[in-house]
Amino acid sequence: MPLSQKQIKKLRQLAHHKKVIVIVGQHGLTDPVMFEIDNALEIHELLKVRINASDKTERNQLIDRIAQQTQSEIVQRIGHIAVFYRQGDDNQLSI
């Protein structure tokens, strides 16, 4: 179920002070990187990822691919940083 605008706003506020946990580097979106992103979402629910792709189109494609493969919602895209949310089993974040 897609997030409402109110929920997205709340998640953006929560993500503001978080640090980037995973960086997609020069080798792109490899299986180990996807595993780390999926694992981090399982633990944190809300995740900041840095995508080091110089081309904006490529960066957006990678962001969309991460969201699709991890079954997460894209909360925000700013430059090289993307914020993802996936509700965990224990629902740590109350949105």
Image (spheres, rainbow, N blue to C red):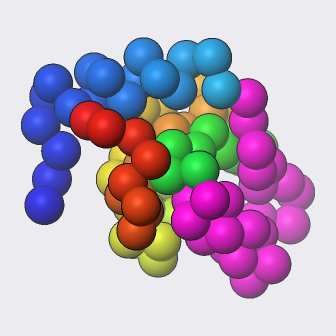
Residue 69 in the image, given as x and y percentages of width and height? 47, 76
Task: Give me the residue at 38% from left, 54% from top.
Answer: 91
Residue 52 in the image, given as x and y percentages of width and height? 76, 44
Please identify the residue farthest to the right as the structure is shown.
Answer: 26
87, 74: nearer the viewer: 87
Task: Give me the residue at 50% from left, 52% from top.
Answer: 45
Horizontal side, residue 86 vs residue 29: left or right: left
Task: Give me the residue at 15% from left, 24% from top.
Answer: 6
Residue 44 in the image, given as x and y percentages of width and height? 59, 50
- Image height of 20 relative to 41, above or below: above
Range of magenta residues: 19-43
Horizontal side, residue 34 vs residue 71: left or right: right
- Image height of 65 relative to 64, above or below: below
Horizontal side, residue 16 vs residue 18: left or right: left
User: In which quadrant is the N terminus drawn?
Assistant: bottom left
Q: Is residue 60 magenta?
A: no
In this orientation, does residue 29 appear? no
- Image height of 90 relative to 16, above or below: below
> In which quadrant of the rendered view does residue 7 lie?
top left
Task: Give me the residue at 63% from left, 17% from top.
Answer: 17
